[in-house]
Image: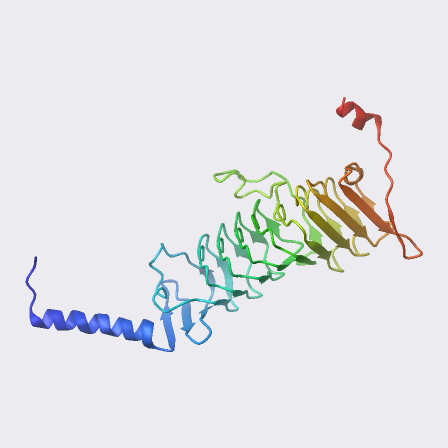
Amino acid sequence: NELHSQAEVDNATAEVTSVYENLVLKDVVTGTLDNGMTWTFTKDGGKLSFEGEGEVPKFESGTAPWNLCGNIETLEFGEGITSIAGYAFTNYTTVKKIKFPSTLTTINIRAFEYCYAVEELVIPDSVTFVGYGTFASLTSLKKVTVPASAKYASYAFEHDENIEEIFITPGADSIMPDCTRTGQLGFPFYQNSTGAYGPWRVAKNATVTVQDGVTSIGMNTFYNAVSGNLTINIPASVNNIGKNCFATNGKTVAYVENANCVIDETNLCSSNVNVMVKSEDGEYAQKPHTHTWGEWKYNN
């Protein structure tokens, strides 16, 4: 409904053509974000990489500057990046690989939710917090490596039911913190708390390997972890296991190498949990438990 000069039409056409050639036709596309961080998309391999310092921001749906570049199969975050914003890469369903830097400390709420195609994750030891639903609904995820010392908001790995292997590294201080319902509550419920419904709630049939160097496992760490079968290998370096670590709806077998490890009695009360402790002769035997009057009274 408006009249435009031929010059205006020509200018608009040139602008659209330039954008199309830069974002769609070039083999390598680069840009700079408002915070000074640079991004690069390489069409061969579909890699989107970020360089700079600070936080990788979130863009509203359809507004990210790399949207027209093509399918993204790899996300790579360079050294100096410390945080990834909430919802930053939600629904990036073509992503298969994610590479994090050793400078990363925080991965916020739902940052990588619904990245269906990712099969393996390695969270660096520098990470201190993983938000609510950060890696939820990664239905192809098979193998995860995470630091013991990080705090995980409830449901951090919700619906990742096909995880087969979980490796827990010592992290910053070698201590797995208590999983408690403390911290700021909000909506969704427990989004900022490290609640008892923790990160491994639905890892149905995984084998967990706690790596040598971890010294303590906090309460509720694997609480309500599975509805299938969970095997947990605990090295000799672990000398303390807190309350209700293994309470579950499925079957859990925990193999504890340290015969002198202090294991809270609550871990021995469930018929669904077998805590096997290694003896001096190298054989594993189930740790016995004698019920107390208090337990029977609690159950009437």
- The residue positioned 50% from the left and 52% from the top of the image is 108
Q: Position of residue 63 (x, y in %)?
A: 33, 59
Q: Which of the 4 quarters of the picture holds residue 215? A: bottom right
Near-viewer residue (245 or 206):
206
Q: Name, please, the residue furthest toward the right.
A: 281
Identify the residue at horizontal 6%, vertical 69% (top origin). 5
Residue drawn at x 44%, y 53% as measured from the top left: 87
Q: Is residue 224 above or below residue 112?
A: above
Against 80, is 205 above or below? above
Query: Between 226 and 188, which is closer to the camera in this rendering?
Result: 226
Residue 22 lies, with reference to residue 160, above or below; the image says below
**From the viewer's perspective, is 255 left or right of 245?**
right
Nearer to me, 181 or 272: 272
Whether residue 261 is visible to the viewer of this picture, yes or no, is no
Quadrant placement of the C terminus: top right
Where does the image place residue 255, in percent across and percent down from the top left? Answer: 80, 52
**Residue 295 appears anywhere in the view:** yes
Identify the residue at image location x=59%, y=49%: 152
Q: Name the image quarter holding the N terminus.
A: bottom left
